Amino acid sequence: MMNLGTILRPVANAGLFAVSDQIVIGATHHESILLDQAVWDALGSEGWAVRRQAAFDASYALIGAIARRLGIEGDREIIDLATELFGTLGLGQLRFEIAATGGEVFGSDLLFGGGFRERYGDALRVRHFLDAFAAGYAAAAASIAYPSDWGSFEAEETRCVARGDADCCFTLSRRPLSFQPGEGLAKGDAEQLLGPDAPPDSDPLPIGVFTRDLMSACVANDRGIIRVGDSRFAILPAAYRAQLTFDTLHLIEKRASSNRAPGPKLAPLFADLAREATRAGVFHLVGSLYDSAPIRDAFGPAPDDPLDRVEQLVSVAGALGWGPITVAELLPETRLVLNVAVTPEAVYYAARHGGTPQSRLPGLQGLAEAIALLVTHVDFTTGDALPAGLYARLSRETPGYHVEESRSILAGDRDCEVVVDMRRRNG
Amino acid sequence: MTAAAPRTDGESAMVLDGLAVGVDHLEAIVIFIASLEAPYAAWVRKGVDLSPARVAAGANGALEMGERMTAALETDARVVSPVTTIESPRRTSFIHRVRSFGVAIVFEREAPLGFARMAAKQIVRTLEQELPYSHAAPAASAPEARPTAPSAPPARADLEFDAHDAAPDTQHHPRSAHGDRVRILIRHVEDHAADGHIARTRLALRSGLGLEALANPDTLGSEALLVLETAAEDILGIEPGKLAEALPA
């Protein structure tokens, strides 16, 4: 496998990362599973189609962009590229047994199904299939490898480790093409949102540069697994998460507005769960990196001053693809204010749906809440700052700080700002 | 296939659009409570002149006849759920039973019979996962499809049953057996779900009832309780119908 640095490229002036021309973000199995679970809670069996379509669109754009850039055209070559890319990104292993008419794809150690087993053990079994991302990815790869103006491939998962099967299996068959495959989320979308007058990237803190180098040096093992601390780590197309989040949110809102009688407010519940997904992922990923031996060896013990500590923590988060976040204010145990020019979800929303006065940055909110938890409740001087079960305990004891978007580039502001009020609770 | 908004005679307890997407020649899906002929949920393709209530009434009779015929033909007493197929001049309809519900799936007559039968089976297979479980028939009243939330602000459900023996408060619903059952259920899910701190939000979203309803469980009826039990089973990952065994009496 290649290391991530071979394929990751910075997006100029945006502080984001791309593979080829597609914006990507570093993620763990925690938020990946929790966000998919929130979609399933919101949409039931329809959630599979929404997730798979988001994965198809994002993967079609990603694999297509790489294939074009490298001049890869043959069917087997494209399937080989897709197989190699999947593992390199830390998403697990796929094995294609397909031809132009369809076939099967076998998955092992997949981020979602395998990550589910890792997160919940054998105690929790689900009845639905979990690997919509792998299904959409496999269908997109097959559709590029065996193109047809009549139709694209669609994948159904027929075995899933999260349901108790020994492996994951997908059946691919060709369906009439009733939609235009999405364009994903390209670097150009970020450049367009920032405009020609965007200030150049400011230099990140040394710890941010170091984290970026650490991430670039990551190499998946032969099972397609990358680990950071106790978490599975992977690079995901940013378009997948954003499309999943906003398609679901819009569907709930549309149904609520078409009801004749006012119904329960379900959209905020989904937004809460989407924010919780990012909170869990950022807490584990940024916390583990910040507590890791390479960073401690390079920078010594974590600083005592909470402001210094929070600036280092957001610098680590920024290096994972969230953009150059700055700390506008920290009142310890009281209030945290973070600024960032754009995030991947903001770029996606602006490119696909335009501006909005509504709160539409659940990912950034979750990130800010996770940073507040890390700086307030985690003791990084102990040598084992994140023991197993810490997040669950903190979540029970400090359920949800109050988080608000006080500025958003989607609402016409010059940047995005979120405020975490640690004295108030959500709900 | 035309994706269309649900068009029912009353409120639909489930959104069925997702089941209909991509199914050619499909005209309607009507779920009804078998013992009552009452439509429970329905999707009718835009522009199709079908009344869910009339379809439910007709399908209920056909379901009963089909089951009687099967009982007369089959010696194996376990065979009780035949698929009744009606080929009328303009339409082909399939009537299935899913526990205490009937499901009528109506296609245009020109739909290839094999395709329509297969598509109907797939829809029913999904509904077997989605429809509430009940050992008895659903309550003999109009279904509480999507209970509207009370106007009171959301608050945590009061789980201390015995701590409130004061004079009745006329501003609130009186305590009900269903309400107590919901309180027990919420507490059980919060205690046993893998991510207990988001269990209440997940229950509220997955059931479609919202947080306000969970904070006021005495306003909920039997249909809502069934929906909540199904959501709880999904979240806890336990077998359908097994939640009752896990809950404290």
Image (cartoon, helix red, strand yellow):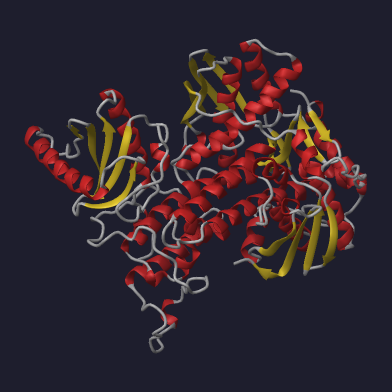
Residue at x-position 18% and y-position 30%: B89
Residue at x-position 47% and y-position 36%: A164
Q: Where is residue B248 drawn, in percent x and y?
A: 38, 64
Q: Where is residue A185 drawn, in percent x and y?
A: 70, 35
| Above or below A144: residue A258 | below
| Above or below A177: residue A32 | below
Judged from this view, the residue extending furthest toward the bottom is B167
Image side of residue B49 versus residue B2, left or right: left
Image side of residue A217 versus residue B20, left or right: right
Residue at x-position 78% and y-position 47%: A342
The reply to whether residue A109 is in sight is no
Which of B172/A375 is in front? B172
Q: Which image quadrant is residue A3 in?
A: top right
Image side of residue A234 versus residue B73, left or right: right
Q: Where is residue A109 drawn, in percent x and y?
A: 60, 31
Q: Which image quadrant is residue B143 in?
A: bottom left
Q: Where is residue A95 drawn, in percent x and y?
A: 58, 20
Task: Please state, as top left, top right, bottom left or bottom right, where the N terminus of chain A lies in the image.
Answer: top right
Judged from this view, the residue extending furthest toward the left is B72
Which of B12/A374 is in front? B12
Residue at x-position 47% and y-position 32%: A165
Image side of residue A190 versus residue A205, left or right: left
Which of A42/B247 is in front? A42
The reply to whether residue B201 is in sight is yes
| Above or below A138: residue A188 | below
Which of B180/B9 is in front? B9
Task: Please state, as top left, top right, bottom left or bottom right, where the C terminus of chain A lies in the image.
Answer: bottom right
Q: What is the count of numbered marks?
A: 0
